[in-house]
Structures are given as C-alpha cells and as structure tokens.
Image: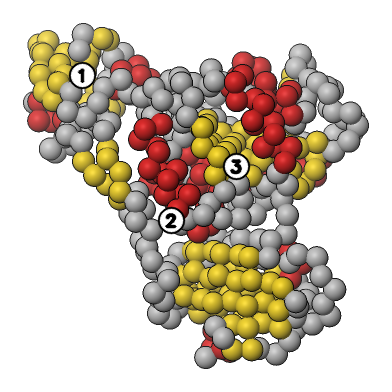
C-alpha cells in the first residue's frame, strides 16, 4: 500500500506488489479519460483471489477526485480487502459518468473486465460493492447488469435512488439470481434503516436472497469492523454459478444484456397477468429547499427557485445569494448538503441571503412529507421466466416478441440437442451452440 504508479493501461509485466496501490487510466465511451485504482491485498498466497469492485459516493460531483490513490489509502474498505484477501478495483465517476448512466456503468464494467484479464482473479468470485451513491449504484447494476458478478454488497445506499436515477428501469425480478448483502444504519440522516426496512421486506416478498443488517451509526462505515466476520463469510461462501432457473424483465433490450443465459431481444405482444408492475410506496421525509445554484462566481447564487418549493414559498428569488441556513454558513454546495441532510420534511428554517446590497432573513418551513412510488418508471417492458433441465428449456413470456438463449452459459450438461418449449409449444431441437434467437411467432 506504499507505492503508487501511474499507467495509461493495465498491462503488467510483473505481479503487483502485495499491499500496493496502483493507479491506471481508462477512456470511457464519452471520450474522457478517467482514473481507476487497483489495491492488492497483503497476502495473495499465489492463487487466484476474489475481486471487490467498490463504487464511491457523491458520484454527481462535477470533477473526479483530485487524488484517487490518496482516497484509496484512506478507505476503510481496505479492511475488508485484507480480511478476505481480495483485490479491490476502485472506479472513479463524476457527473456525466455516474453509476446510474450508460457512460459510468459501462466504464465500471470495462474496467472490471480489464482487471480480470491482467490479474490472478477468480472470475467466479467478483463482487460489486459501494457506499452511499456507490451502494445505490450497486443496486442499479444488480438489477440491470448482474451477469459478471457473484454477489452485491450495498452499504448505506438506497434502492429507491437507483430506481429514480437509473437510465434503465429497475425490476425486482432481476435481483433473483444473485445474493445481496445490504447495510443501512439506524441514525443515517440520508437512508436510515427504518426508512429502508420496507425495501428489505419488499425484496424478501419477491424471494430475493437478501442479508439485511441494521447496525448503529450514521452515514459512514464505522460499523465495518463489526461487520467484517459476516462479510468475509458472505464472500467466502458465494460463487457465480450457472443457474437452471432464469427470470428477466427489460424495457430496453438494446441496452440490457439480459441475465446469464436468458435474454429479451425484442418487445411485442400483450402482457400476461403474471407480469404486474412492481408496487412499493414509501414516505419521503427529507428536507428539500428547491434551489438550483449558479456557482460560477464562487458563491451560492440562486439560478432558479422551484415554483412551490420550500425556498420559493419563503420568498427566495433568482439572483439572491444564500449565505446561511439557520445561522450556519452555506459557503459551498458541499456545506449545503451536510446542513440539509440534518433537516427533515416539515421542519421550520431561516435563510440569510443577500439581494443586491441588502441582507435579508426569510423564514419558512420545509416541504411536508409525502408518499411516492419507488418504481415510478413504467415504460412498456417484457418479462421471461425459464427453466433448464433434462435437455429441455421451458420458457414463458409476457410482452416479448423475441428472446435469445446463450447456450454456452447453461448449467453443465451432455446434451447434443436441446428442446425449447416456448409458451407451451415445442420447437425443433437445436444444437447447444452460442447465442440463438427464438421469435415468438415460432410458438404462436
């Protein structure tokens, strides 16, 4: 963990030194080069080791962290790397390349593949993890691009955030093939355990393999030492295995690769009764000012006060410069974030601001709490449920015009031909090679 080297690509002529931090660069699909860091555990015993991919928080920041290697050195997550003897990949995102958009999520997957090619990693023991925004991003990728990973570790994050911010809709069925290890702390001002408990209950009702932990603590990982034994057991016991039962839902087959061997390649047709929109309503209790700031001049100058928002109702106007909230200085967006996360919906507040040459104090009350639908994104989608056994795939579809089967990823078998039964109709047996498409009019 002492040396830090900078390479334009991950090409290794010698193994990484034990306990080292090495920084590399990757050019994402937007043409921008960003850093990523690889940590090597102190003990690797010469064999293939698990890989943890760790997504950082605050991914909507405009700039990438100035010193990624220093961030990694300070990360308490390295305690888990040492406890399980895991390599750790730290991608670095920013606004425009977040864990919730195509650029950022594609970057994470590409960097993961590069590390797998170059390091002695057990490809069946790759885990996606993250804290805060990184944990919410873990939920998002677990529901949209799970195929590379053995399991998911989400620390102080929010499935509702993933469902709201994600470029693709999130469907509960897509969590079924991989185990989730989720931690929400009881005093977290952003995602407290009590607020996230209905999410855990919802996932369990959908038969998701979920370990949900609710230790004491705030929005930090001070609980990590106490969680290490359970986390290391989770990593040791979890491997990516070929599955016999597959269940996948998608609204955009062009953007979503499917799950394991089952893919949706074209939407079409009527939805069946068993394909119901997911229904989970939660109570929104966070305080929101409803302001957009123009920080070009180095101050919190109001670019827009949302009509009907908390600040607008108190009298804030575009052009005002916000100085303080309840007497505490708001000299930058980060300070504003930390102040607001301590407030709750319905709380009273006082804003100090400058309007022209005048200093004003405006009083108001934050937005009242309200109920919202977690899975509000509901474009047309298709769902497929399938089972493989005895040289036969049995699949039932809803609102799908075409599906595909990746025969190379089926559980081990000795079948020379495999029969596909699609919505009750037997199709001609096929040789189990590569990715093959099946149109629903074949089974009409």
Badge 1 element:
strand
Task: Choose mark 1 or mark 2, whichever is in front.
Answer: 2
Q: Nearer the viewer, residue 120 or 211?
A: 211
Badge 1 or badge 3: first in the primary sequence: 3
Left or right of 114? Residue 384 is: left
Please tell me which residue lies in front, 64 or 367: 367
Q: Image quarter for residue 244?
A: bottom right
Horizontally, residue 233 falls left or right of residue 254, namely right
The quarter of the rendered structure image containing the N terminus is top right
Asked whether the beta carbons under mark 1 and mark 3 sit within 8 Å of each other, the answer is no
Circle 2 Cα neighbour tier, 10 Å, few/some/many (<14 / 14–19 / ≥20) = many
Q: Quadrant of residue 408?
A: bottom right
- Can residue 63 be seen here? The reply is no
329 up-or-down from 23: above or below:
above
Residue 207 visible in image: yes
x then y, percent, for residue 50: 76, 37
Q: Considering the numbered disc 2 on the image, is that residue within a helix, a strand or a loop?
A: loop
User: Where is mark 2, residue-wise?
Assistant: 169
Would you say 286 lies left or right of 84 here?
A: left
Residue 62, placed above or below residue 268: above
- Quickly name the residue at label 1: 321
Please name the residue shown 61% across and 33% down the image. Answer: 54
- Mark 1 to mark 2: distance in Å? 37 Å
* Residue 443 place in picture, x, y as percent: 56, 88
- Of the two numbered discs 1 and 2 on the same chain, state the one appearing first in sequence: 2
* Separation of residues labelled 3 and 2 (CA atoms): 18 Å
Residue 265 placement (x, y as % from top left): 56, 72
For the residues marked 1 and 3, what is the alpha-carbon distance in whole angstroms?
A: 43 Å
């Amino acid at each position: 963990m002492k040396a830090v080297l900078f390479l334009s690509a991950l090409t290794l002529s010698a193994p990484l030194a034990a306990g080292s931090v090495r920084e590399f660069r990757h050019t994402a699909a937007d043409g921008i080069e960003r850093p990523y860091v690889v940590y090597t555990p102190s003990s690797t015993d010469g064999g293939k080791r698990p890989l943890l991919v760790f997504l950082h928080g605050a991914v909507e920041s405009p700039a990438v962290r100035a010193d990624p290697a220093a961030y990694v050195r300070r990360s308490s997550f390295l305690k888990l790397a040492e406890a399980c003897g895991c390599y750790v990949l730290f991608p670095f995102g920013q606004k425009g390349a977040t864990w919730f958009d195509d650029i950022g999520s594609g970057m994470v997957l590409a960097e993961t593949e590069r590390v797998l090619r170059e390091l002695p990693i057990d490809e069946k023991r790759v885990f996606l993890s993250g804290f805060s925004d990184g944990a919410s991003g873990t939920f998002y990728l677990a529901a949209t691009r799970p195929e590379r990973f053995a399991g998911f570790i989400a620390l102080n994050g929010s499935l509702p955030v993933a469902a709201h911010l994600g470029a693709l809709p999130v469907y509960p069925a897509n969590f079924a093939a991989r185990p989730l290890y989720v931690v929400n702390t009881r005093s977290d001002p952003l995602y407290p355990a009590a607020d996230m408990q209905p999410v855990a209950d919802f996932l369990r009702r959908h038969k998701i393999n979920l370990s949900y932990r609710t230790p004491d603590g705030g929005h930090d990982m001070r609980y990590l030492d106490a969680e290490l034994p359970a986390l290391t057991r989770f990593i040791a016991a979890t491997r990516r295995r070929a599955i016999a039962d597959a269940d996948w839902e998608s609204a955009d087959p062009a953007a979503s690769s499917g799950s394991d061997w089952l893919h949706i390649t074209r939407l079409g047709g009527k939805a069946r009764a068993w394909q119901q929109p997911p229904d989970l309503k939660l109570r929104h209790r966070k305080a929101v000012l409803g302001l957009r700031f123009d920080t070009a001049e180095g101050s919190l100058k109001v670019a827009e006060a949302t009509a009907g928002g908390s600040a607008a109702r108190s009298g804030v106007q575009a052009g005002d410069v916000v100085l303080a909230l309840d007497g505490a200085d708001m000299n930058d967006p980060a300070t504003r974030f930390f102040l607001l996360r301590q407030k709750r919906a319905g709380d009273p507040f006082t804003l100090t601001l400058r309007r022209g040459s005048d200093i004003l104090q405006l009083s108001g009350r934050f937005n009242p709490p309200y109920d919202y639908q977690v899975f509000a994104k509901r474009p047309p989608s298709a769902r497929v449920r399938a089972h493989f056994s005895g040289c036969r795939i049995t699949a039932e579809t809803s609102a799908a015009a075409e599906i595909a089967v990746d025969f190379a990823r089926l559980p081990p078998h000795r079948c020379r031909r495999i029969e596909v039964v699609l919505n009750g109709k037997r199709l001609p047996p096929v040789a189990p090679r590569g990715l093959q498409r099946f149109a629903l009019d074949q089974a009409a």
